[in-house]
Image: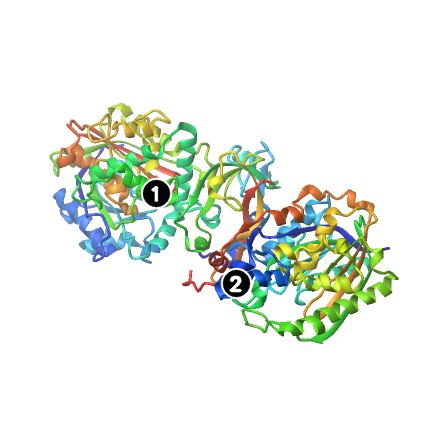
Amino acid sequence: MKSGIVSYGAYIPRYRIRPKDIGVVWGADGEAMGRGLNIRAKSVPGPDEDVITISVEAARACMAKVDLDPTEIGAIYVGSESHPYAVKPTATIVAEAISSAPVLTAADFEFACKAGTAAIQTTMGLTLSKMMKYGLAIGSDTSQGAPGDALEYSASAGGAAFLIGVDHVAAEIAHTVSFTTDTPDFWRREGQRYPSHGGRFTGEPAYFKHVLNCAQLLFKRAGTTAEDYDHAVFHQPNGKFPVRAAKQLGFKEGQIDTGLCVREIGNTYSGAIMVGLCAILDEADPGDRIFAVGYGSGAGSDGFDLTVTEEIRKIRRDATPSIKEMIADSVFLDYATYAKYRGKILMREA
Amino acid sequence: MRDVAVIGVGETEFGELWDRSFRDLGIEAGLKAIQDAKLRSEDIDAVYIGNMSAGKFIDQEHVSALVADYSGLADMHLPTVRVEGGGACGAIALLQARLAIASGMHDIVVVGGAEKMTDVGEVQAAEILSSTADQEWESVFGATFAGLYAMMARRHMHEFGTTREQMAAVAVKNHKNGALNPEAQFQKEITIDAVLQAPWVAEPLGLFDCAPLSDGAAAVVLCEAQRARKFSDTPIRIAGSGQASDFLALHDRRDLTTLDATVIAGKRAFHEAKIMPKDIQVAEVHDNFTISEILAIEDLRFIEKGKGGPATAEGLTALNGKISVNTSGGLKARGQPVGATGVAQAVEIVRQLRGEAGKRQVVGARHGLTHTLGGTGATAVVHLFERGD
Amino acid sequence: MSLAIPRFWREIQSRYNLIGTKCGNCGKVDFPPRAVCPVCGRKSIGKMQRFQLGGKGSVVTYTVIHDAPAQFEMQKPYVMAIIEMDEGVRLTSQLIDVKPEDVRIGMKVQASFRKLGQDGDAGVIHYGYKFRPAG
C-alpha cells in the first residue's frame, strides 16, 4: 500500500511587480537584480488576500478536481510563515470553507519554506496508518521582504493544496526522506514585521547543503539516479539556486523546466515547491516519475519520489485554471500600488 | 375615523449648523409650529418624533422625552413617542399621530422630525445612513447606500435608456427650486454640466446626484378637523395616507427599477382620498439621489414607467409644470436631515396649499402629496393633503 | 463597520459556503437562509431545508464605488453588483479580478473566497464571498 497525491490545487494572486520597478525606488539596478535572481516578476496578493484566502482557494481548487465528500478529510494542515493570525489557526477556516468541519483534526505548521511538505509527510503517515482516509496538506505564503532588502525582489504570494490518501492515488509517493540540522540562515523573531537573513550564508551551508544531502539520501533510498526521472522540482527561492542544485545532481534542463515557476512569480515560500509540483501534475502522464526536494530555512529538506498513476486521467484537471493559466493571468503594479497593497504605507487608524 | 388637519407648521433652516445642537433644532421647529397654530401648551395631547439615528449620530436615545422636555413641556407629562423607520421615520410619525387623533384618543398632537448629522465625520455619517440597508448582506460586503441606489440607476438606464443627463436634470430642477426657498441648504442654481462633471460617488451617480448630509428639524401640529378652524384659517386636511414595506435588501425585490412599496403606499393613499394622481398639483418626493425622484414620479403614476428621465428633462416636473415636484428644493437642495424629511415635506405641502410658498408658489395648488422612503425602499409612506375650502 | 465577534461568526456558513435554504413546499431557494418562505408563508414553517448555492451566477446590475467605507478604502474604486445565482436567488457582492470598465450586465461570474474586512489591526478578520468573472 502506498500513500500519495489524490488531488491537487493551487492559487496564485494575479498582481505582479517587476524587479526593475522595485529597484528604481531604492536606487538599485533592479533589472540586474532580476537577472541575477533569474526572476522576471513576482506575484503580489491583493489587499483582500492573505494566507487564509490563498489556502482556501487552493483547497477548493483541489476538491473541485475530484468527486469526494469533504467530510472524509480527517486532517487539514496549513504550512506557512505568514499566517494572518499569530494565534488562531488558518486550518480551521479552511476546514469550514471546504465543508470538512467539524469531525477532523487541524493545525498550522511553520518551518520557513518547507512547512507545506512537512504537512504532506504528516498526512502520508496518518493515511498509511489508516488513522484517516484523507488528509489535506497546504503550503501557502504571502511573504514579505523588508523594503529595499534583497528579499523584496523575490518574496511573493501563492499556495497549493494536496489531498493525500491511499485510495485513488494519482501520484504515488514511494519514498520520502528528510535532512534536518540547526542552521540559522533565515528567521523572523516574534513581533518582527520582516524576516532577517544571513546574506550569502543562506547559500552553501544552508540551501545547498540540505537540498543536496536530502537528494542524495532520496536517490539511495529509491535506488535511482537523475536519469530515472521525467521531472524534478526543488525549493525555488530564486531562479538560480534550484538550477544549480539540479545540475549538481545530474538533472538536465528539460527535467526541471516545467516546475520552475519562480521565474514568473517569485518565491512563494511554503507554496514554492508545491506550486512547482502542481505545474508538473498539470501536464504529467501516467508513469511519469517526479523527484521533489524542498527546503526550509532553519533548516531542513524534505524529499519525495513520486510516480504518476492512471488515476491522473480521472482527475478533472481542467476544472480549475492550470498553473500556466494563473501565471499568464497577470496585472502589473507600480511600486506605489504594491506598497499600498502590502501595507507598507503608514495609514491612520480605520 | 375622525378627520385630521394640519393647523401649524415650522422648521429650522437646513444645513451644516455647527453652532446648533440636536436639542436646539428640535425646539426651534416645534415652537415655530406651535406658534403658527397659536396653541397653548395645555392644548397639546401628545408629541411624536421622527428620528432615524440619534443613537449613532449623537449617542443619544430617548429623544422623544428630550424634545418635549427642552420645549418646556416637561411639566405637562405628555405621552411622547419616537418613531424609527430609516428615512421614512418622520412620515411614519405623522401617520401615527394622525391615527392617534383619528381614533379619538387625542385631539391635538405635535409631530416633529429632527436629525443632527454633522457631529460625526462624513465617512461615519455615510456608514450610519447605510445602516438602513441590510447590514448583514449588503453593507458588510461593501455596498454603500449610494452604491445601492446607483445599482437601481444602472438598471433603469439599461432597461429604459435613461441617461445621466436626465438624472442630472433632477438635480438642476431641485437646485432651481431651492434657490427660491430661504430655508434651503443650497440656494444656488447649478448646471447640467456641473452635475455631470462632479466627482463620482458610486457610478453612475456623482456628487451632485446625491442629497447632502444636513442638520435640521421640522414640525407640524395636527388637530381633529372639526376643531381645526379654531386655530387656523386655512387648515390643511390629510385626505389619505398609505404606508408599505418590502424586502429589506434591494437584491431580494421583485424589480430593481420599481419600488413596490412606493406603488402600494401610493395606491392606498389615493384609494382613501378618492382622488387620482392627476389631481395632484404639487408633490414632495424622496429625492435622496436623483434616480430616486425618477423612480418616485413613475411609481406614484405621475409619469409612465420608464419615462421619468425624459419627463424631467422636458420640464414636466418643474415649478408650475405638469406637476410641480420638490418645490422646496427636495432633499437634494433643501437638505437631508433624515428624521426631519417626512415632516419637512409636509411643511412644504401645507405652505403650498395655504398659498404661502412665496416665489415658489404653485398656482392653483389644491391637492398635494408627500412621498418618503426608508432605506432603499423597504419602507415607503405617502400622505395626501387638501385645502379645507 | 465594526462587527461583534459572534455576529459575524454565526453567519460563517453562509458567508463562506453560500448556504441558504430551499422551501420544502414550493422549492424556492433563498439566500441567506430564511425560517419562513416568502412565497408559501406559514405552509413552509418547519420545511425550510439547508441548501448550498453552486457559486455561479450573472450580473443583474452593478456600480463602481468611489466613496468607500473605511474598511474598503484600500480597494477603491471597487465594483459592487447584484448577482442572480443560477438557482434564481439574488445577492449583493463585490466583483473582483475585473476592471470596472469591463463589467457588463449579464456577465457570468463565480464565487471566490476573500477577506471582507477586519475589526482593526488587532481584531478578528472577516472572510466571505466575492465574485470574479467566470473562467
Q: Residues within 10 Å of mark 2 (few under 14, many from 20)?
A: many
Residue at the location (52% across, 46% down)?
Answer: C96
Residue at the location (25% across, 27% down)?
Answer: B316
Please give left or right for residue A190 compared with residue B98 in the image: right
Q: Amino acid at mark 1?
A: Gly
Q: What is the tally of numbered marks visible in this picture?
A: 2
Decide which of A161, A253 is in the foreground and name it: A253
Please give left or right for residue B133 compared with residue A40 in the image: left
Q: Quadrant of residue B39?
A: top left
- What chain does mark 1 sit on? B
Q: Position of residue A313 (x, y in %)?
A: 78, 43
Tell me the number on the disc at residue A23.
2
Please give left or right for residue A3 compared with residue B194 in the image: right
Q: Secondary structure at mark 1?
A: strand
Q: Position of residue A248 (x, y in %)?
A: 78, 65
Decide which of B315, B369 is in the foreground and name it: B315
Decide which of A228, A323 is in the foreground and name it: A228
Q: Residues within 10 Å of mark 1 (few under 14, many from 20)?
A: many
Discs 1, 2 touching: Cβ within 8 Å: no
Name the residue carrying label 1.
Answer: B206
Q: Secondary structure at mark 2?
A: helix
Decide which of B274, B352 is in the foreground and name it: B352
Q: Amino acid at mark 2?
A: Gly
Tell me the quarter of the image containing the C terminus of chain C.
top right
